[in-house]
Structure formats: C-alpha cells, structure tokens
Image: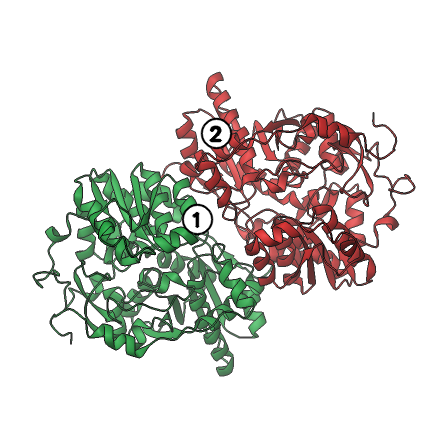
Chain colours: A red, B green
C-alpha cells in the first residue's frame, strides 16, 4: 500500500500537557459575573461545586497545563485516537483537496466526552470528593461521566431528562453498566424536582437544578459539566495536540480546521492548538465552527451576558446567545441544542479568528451517508455538521483547483442514532426552522448586565 | 507511564497473508458431501454460489494465502486493531496472570465480521459478480456484508429474519445506510418465502433459503456466508496474525488462547495462527472454545455428518452437531446460537488440540460488567463468554500462584445490545436451559450418511 490512510501515534505520545489558549488570549475583557451581585466571579463562588484545581484552570495564565499521570493512564484505554486521511471520500468527490479526520468515536463511550470526564473525576477524587452529580439529555455526557467515575472509584448520580429516560433506555443501561445511579428528572429527591413534578417530561434546566442542589447539599459531593466552561475546553485540546503531531507524520498542515459546535468544547478540542499557531506564528489557517441551522447561536444570536442554564442559576457569561430560555427545535443532533457557547469561542468568533456557519439537518445527514459509504464509519449526527462543511470545502477546492488541506473532528459514532438515519433514508427527516420571533422574545428576557463591546 | 497498556501496529504491518491451517491439518479424512448424492463435494457443486477463488481457498494446501492489496486497503480503515493488556482488570482480580485482549470492535460495523465480508466482496467483484445475497438474524453479519459491498460497488440484498426486522430497526437502518436492500423474511420475492408466508416471524433457515434462491436465479449474483466455512475462518486469521506480532512487542507468548464460538470463525481467527505454532513447534499453549450453555455444540453434541442449515439445502459437513433443526433457547448472544460448528474446529476439538467449555449467560454478563467497569469497553454478549473463561483462568492462575499469559478475542462491542445489559442489571436475565430431550429428538432426524470415526 503506497498511500497511507491512517496516522497512528504510540501510547507513549499521549500528550503530556493540555493547551491553555486562555494564556494567549489574555484576561477576558468581560469576566463572568455572579448572578446575584453582578460582580466578577471569584474562585470562592465556584468552590461549592468544583474542586480548586479546576477553578484554577478556568483562570490560569499558564500556556500549558500538565496532564496528571493518572489521567494519561486512563486516556491510554483509547488514546491516542487515530487520524485518517479520507482517501475514498476524496475520490468520491473527485477533489484535489486532502481531507483528514480525527476520530474520537473509539472511546468506550463512543465520543470525545470522556476526555474531560476523566480529568474532572481525577481532580475531584484528588481533593477528597466522594460523589459527582450531573445532568444528561440523550445520555452522552452522563455515560462519559459514569465511565470516568467508575475509573476513579467515585459515586456518580445522573439526573436524566424524563422524556429521554423513557425513550432512551439503552443510554441509561450504559450508565448503569458503568456503575452510575440514574434518576428520572424531575425526581422527588430534590426540592427542585418536587417543585417541577407537574413537568412530567422534564427538561435539561430542571435536571441541572436537581444535580446542583444535590451537590450543594453535601460536602463530599461536587457537580460536573460537560461543555462550555474553560476547563472543559482545555481538557479537549488533547485532540488537537495529537492531530498536530499526526499531520506532521503526514507531512501536512491544515488550511482549514472544522468542528461542530454545541457548547464549544469539541470544536475547541480540535481547533485551539492550531489557533495558537495562528496567533503566535501568523499561520493563515481558517477555522470554521459548524452549528445547526435550527439553533444558530454564533450566526444569528446576540453577543451579551446571559445565564448558562435555562432557569438562571449559573453565573452570567459573555457569549453569543439566543436567550437562556430559548427552546431550539428538536433536531437529532441533541448535543448541539444549546442556546449559548463557550465564552472563549464566542470571543474568537467576535474577533474574526473563527468563522461560523449554520447547517440544516437534512444536509448534514446527506453528508453523513456519503461519508459512511466512502469511509465506513457511521458518524454521529453532531459531527455530521462538520462533515457537511468539510465536503463543501473540498468541493470549493475542486472548483478553485486547489490542493486544500482540510481537517475536521469526527467527535463520535452514530451507533446510538440509527433512528435518525432511518428517518433520513425514508425521506421523513425535515429541516426544523429556527424562529426569529421566539429568539427575540427570549432575548427580551436577558438578565440585566453591562453591555458587551 | 512505565507500564504499557496498548500494543499498536502501524498500517504497514497489516498482515500480507492469511494463515491456512488446513495445510497443516492435511486433507480432511471426512470431506463434505453433496446433500443429494452423498458423494464428496466438488468445486463445481459450489460454483453457482461462490467465486472460484473462495472455493479454491476451501481446499487449498498452501500454508499461507496472500491478501490482495485491494482488501488490505479496506482493512486499513480499521486494521491493525489494538491489542490491550487488561492491567486494570488484573488489578481488580488481584491476579498474577497477564491478561491480553485483541479488540475487533473498532471496525465500522463494530465486530470482526467485516474481515471476511470485505474479502468475499473483493473476490466476487473480481470474478464479475454484480450482486451478493445473504441472510441475517440480529443484523451483525448483514451489516458487515452491506459495508463490504458498498466498498467494492456491489449490490447487496439481505434477507432479515422477520422478528428481528421488526424488533431491530437500527441494524436494518445500518445496512441501508451502507446502501443495502433489506427484505423482511419470509418475503414474497422468492418461492421459498412465499411457501413459508404463514411463518410470519421467519427463521434463519427460511432467510438462507431465500438468499440462496435469489443467488441461484441470476448469473451475476452470488451468495455469501459469515461463518463456518473454511474460507471464512481463513479470512479471520488476520486477527491472530496481528496478535502474534503485538505479543512479541509485549515480550510475551500466550499460555492460553480463548475465543467464543458460534460458527467458529471468530475463534479460528484468534487461535489458528497460534495453533500452527503448537502443531509445528510443539508449543504448550492451551486453546479454549467458549460456547453458550444453552447451545452446547462442542460439549454436548455428537460428531456426525449434518446439514449446515436448518432446512437441509447445504452440503453435509462433518462436525459436532445438536441436529440441524435443533432450536436453541433465545439467549442474548444471538451470534452463538448455531447447531453446528466449523468442521476444522470440530476436528481440532475431537483431536484434543482445542478444549471446549460451556458458559451460562448470567455468568457471561457478570464477567462483561466486571470487564466494562475495569477496562471501559462494553463487550458484546458473544465475546462476554470468552471474557468469563479468561477471568476464570486468571483466578485459577492466582490460586496456583502462576504468571499465566492469557489472550482472548474481544470480537465486538455491545452498543447494540444494551437491552440485554438492562435485563441483567435489573436481575431479569435468567439462564436458559439446554434440553437434552430436544437434542435427542433433533439427532434422530440427522441425514443418512457414513459414520465418523
């Protein structure tokens, strides 16, 4: 075989440090604010929920943060993940572009989420915490945290949105296989749950409230979040750090880096290490954040202080937002249905370092099926948004006659999403429209806070 | 990290040849027989269903058979697969044993099945065939053949057992995503199907008849089988060939090699390359075939000529059998519910080269959950039988104070089998009993044929 398809790294090359892009960006001009006082958030405000090591990572000015040996040992169960050159897709598209994808679906949970779950479990364990709580919708984050807690001997309690609990028993079983306790939310274990008992089908907002309440009620219990926050984006940079090394093996450097965006951590994971090159060395790489057209935070939202959660318990974060109580249409890419985005990513979009584009779900699934038929792997609905953009870039390169090098993050497989493929193949999948009116109504309910410049 | 967990091979070390153990075993004393004439089967008998290259592989005396470059290129989409040392499981068991597992779940279909599907699609394409037909139960084999046909531009028509078609729409969607046409069996497309229309829920036997009928009806169409036959076992030996090289990297050689057994190909895949060492070099390695206690072909069956299929259309094969129309209880390890086994494996059991042991499904799932909590990966129900035996061997080594080196094949992940885990975790999984009486009744219906010595 003269042409290489796969660029593998040995276990010894699992990165030893995460890339802290915050050090390059400097102290944020608009810090997160306490939801009550509207004063800049202090470490003490966060201490009841997170271990100090993670709080420090939120604010660190260190360019690199060492990955603890214990975390690297767990990473070794699936990392380094492979980088593939999509030669068969290139042929199918008849493009001169070189398309590379980093495949995170080889983790036991089937996605990139364990990269941060394992780190969070480690730091909590190290500070004497005995139990972590979290919320989960479809179950991708909950199962990753269940896995991570099992690895470090922590208890894990997951509040799963009621309707998903009823409809997705397989993800629940996955969490239980890894030893977690899963509650249907709203539950009668918390005041928040009992007060919302009439909302039988539940919501992510209620589930967050339940998980936070339980964490606040016990000294040995903390809360854990799967995206948006700085430390979550940080932990995901192992993806890009490995990809840099693997592309070196291929003798290439990307002209375009693409990731899908829900809360921003998976995009940050593939992109931030390359964005550091751009900021420090003036590389001309383009970065494209692919979001769902039904929840177009970066392309249609406003840049403002807003709550991270639906009910308004979290700090105010400076970000593009559709309004914290905006309810996106139920697209199959459940992991991308978030009203805001990581503040660091929003700032990069604002400054023009990162481009954003919105993708309709039928176009995403069209790309997913084309990808699966060429490369084999059936992608999750979320990264299929990135695949759509990668294919469009490859076709543009063909049009322009350019040997463009394209890199995207294939953040997970679609084995738990075959119902969506079924609907697409039967022609029953439609594009769910974003409502400008509903966004405007939600934006009218933004919390009072300083305007962002 | 001082201790290595993962033993990866680069793409350039994908094996260049399959290991043909048939060359070591010599011409079989009991050849397969034509079901009508009861004369030894000739290549011409098989030609309407299989390409000549595969028929030759059935009978080849070459010790190694070259893997075509085009097949290796597709293998590169997921091969070489990783070999892991299960250090966390060893710790959990507090055993001096060294436990290694070869992980085939990284293939796009999630199991070892594509190893032969890709080879079969290639040889059929090379001989001008335009379409392959096959049957599938739960869909593991059908999805692997769908993938392989897509890679070589062949049409693929799959007859899926009716009850599975209704209950497992996700596996059907997987086949369709890879471009296959899936029929609910019994269908009205074939005479066999129409004649069985009253058996609404279908059976593997009916589905086989439908697939074979369609293949026989057109010159450009062949039939494809996912286990039992010699060429299928042959193609799976890439697993063991890679494992030999990977264990060299670990500086070890196995004392015990374990695989689960349905039709025998996955066991052959991990074991045959090592069995060659035993036969040629006198290595003392033990080989253990792990079968379900509910379908104990090797441990309770009789050694006799029998049909490979339920309805009696295939050649008579010399094997351990429970009777071709014996219906095993519906254990969750659907891939292991087969009345017979590969003739080569049966001969090795008969000669004492391979030991066989039967595992109850609750004990298999107990091992699976212990494995998942230690190593992360959630195993399929089939390889969980091998895990059970591996754990028992590791505990025996502890008892004996031995540093036993154990290797098993983790042939696939369990992401499509979470309903079974759910049942196990809720205490609703029971051991389904094998009926000696039903076996005796089925054995009374064995075809007339020479006795095996």
Where disc 1 sits, the SS reads helix
Locate residue B340, reporting x and y percent. 27, 67
Q: Is B362 located above or below residue B309 in the figure?
A: below
Which residue position is annotated with label 2?
A: A98
State which quadrant residue B274 falls in: bottom left
Q: Determine the residue positioned at 20% across, 37% down.
A: B128
Q: Which mark identifies residue B169?
A: 1
Whether residue A241 is visible to the viewer of this picture, yes or no, is no
The residue depicted at 70 percent of the width and 47 percent of the height is A204
Residue A34, x across and y down, in percent: 87, 42
| Circles 2 and 1: CB atoms closer than 8 Å | no
* Res B432 quadrant in image: bottom left
**Chain to which the residue tagged by mark 2 belongs:** A
Q: Is residue A337 left or right of residue B230?
A: right
Q: Cα distance, mark 2 to mark 1?
A: 35 Å
Q: Give the position of the C terminus of chain B as an image quadrant.
A: bottom left
Query: B209 or B315, which is in the foreground?
Result: B209
Mark 1 surroundings within 10 Å by alpha-carbon count, few (fewer than 14), some (14 through 19), many (20 or more): some
Chain that bears disc 1: B
The image quadrant that residue B406 belongs to is bottom left
Q: Badge 2, how many Cα within 10 Å: few under 14, some, many 20+?
A: many
Position of residue A200 measured from the top left corner of the image (x, y, whole percent): 69, 51
Taking B151 as reference, is B308 left or right? left
In the picture, the quarter occupied by the N terminus of chain B is: bottom right
């Amino acid at each position: 075989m003269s042409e290489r398809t796969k660029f593998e790294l040995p276990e010894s090359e699992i990165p030893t440090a995460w890339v802290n892009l915050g050090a390059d960006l400097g102290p944020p001009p608009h810090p997160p604010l306490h939801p009550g006082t509207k004063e800049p958030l202090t470490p003490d405000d966060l201490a009841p929920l997170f271990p100090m090591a993670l709080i420090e990572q939120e604010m660190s000015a260190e360019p690199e943060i060492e990955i603890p040996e214990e975390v690297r040992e767990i990473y070794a169960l699936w990392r380094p993940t492979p980088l593939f050159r999509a030669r068969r897709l290139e042929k199918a598209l008849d493009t001169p572009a070189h398309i590379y994808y980093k495949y995170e679906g080889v983790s036991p949970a089937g996605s990139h989420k364990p990269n941060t779950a394992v780190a969070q479990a480690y730091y909590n364990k190290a500070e004497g915490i005995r139990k972590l709580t979290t919320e989960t919708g479809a179950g991708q984050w909950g199962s990753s945290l269940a896995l991570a807690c099992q690895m470090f001997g922590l208890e894990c309690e997951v509040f799963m949105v009621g309707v998903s609990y009823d409809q997705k028993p397989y993800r629940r079983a996955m969490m239980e296989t890894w030893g977690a306790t899963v509650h249907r939310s709203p539950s009668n274990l918390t005041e928040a749950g009992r007060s919302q008992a009439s909302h039988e089908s539940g919501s992510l907002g209620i589930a967050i409230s339940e998980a936070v309440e339980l964490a606040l009620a016990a000294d040995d219990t903390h809360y854990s979040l799967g995206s948006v926050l700085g430390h979550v984006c940080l932990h995901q940079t192992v993806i890009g750090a490995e990809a840099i090394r693997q592309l070196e093996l291929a003798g290439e450097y990307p002209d375009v880096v693409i990731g899908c965006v829900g809360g921003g951590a998976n995009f940050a994971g593939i992109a931030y290490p390359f964005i550091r090159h751009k900021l420090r060395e003036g590389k001309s790489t383009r970065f494209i954040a692919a979001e769902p057209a039904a929840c177009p935070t970066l392309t249609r939202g406003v840049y403002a202080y807003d709550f991270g959660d639906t009910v308004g318990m979290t700090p105010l974060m400076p970000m593009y937002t559709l309004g914290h109580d905006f309810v996106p249409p139920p697209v199959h890419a459940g992991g991308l249905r978030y009203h805001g985005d990581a503040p660091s990513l929003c700032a990069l979009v604002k400054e023009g370092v990162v481009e954003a584009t919105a993708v309709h779900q039928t176009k995403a699934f069209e790309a997913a099926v084309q990808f699966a038929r060429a490369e084999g792997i059936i992608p999750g609905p979320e990264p299929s948004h990135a695949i759509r953009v990668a294919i469009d870039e490859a076709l543009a390169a063909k049009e322009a006659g350019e040997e463009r090098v394209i890199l995207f993050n294939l953040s997970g497989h679609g084995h738990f999403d075959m119902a969506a493929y079924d609907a697409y193949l039967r022609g029953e999948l439609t594009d769910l429209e974003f409502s400008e009116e509903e966004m405007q109504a939600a934006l009218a309910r933004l919390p009072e806070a300083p305007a962002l410049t």
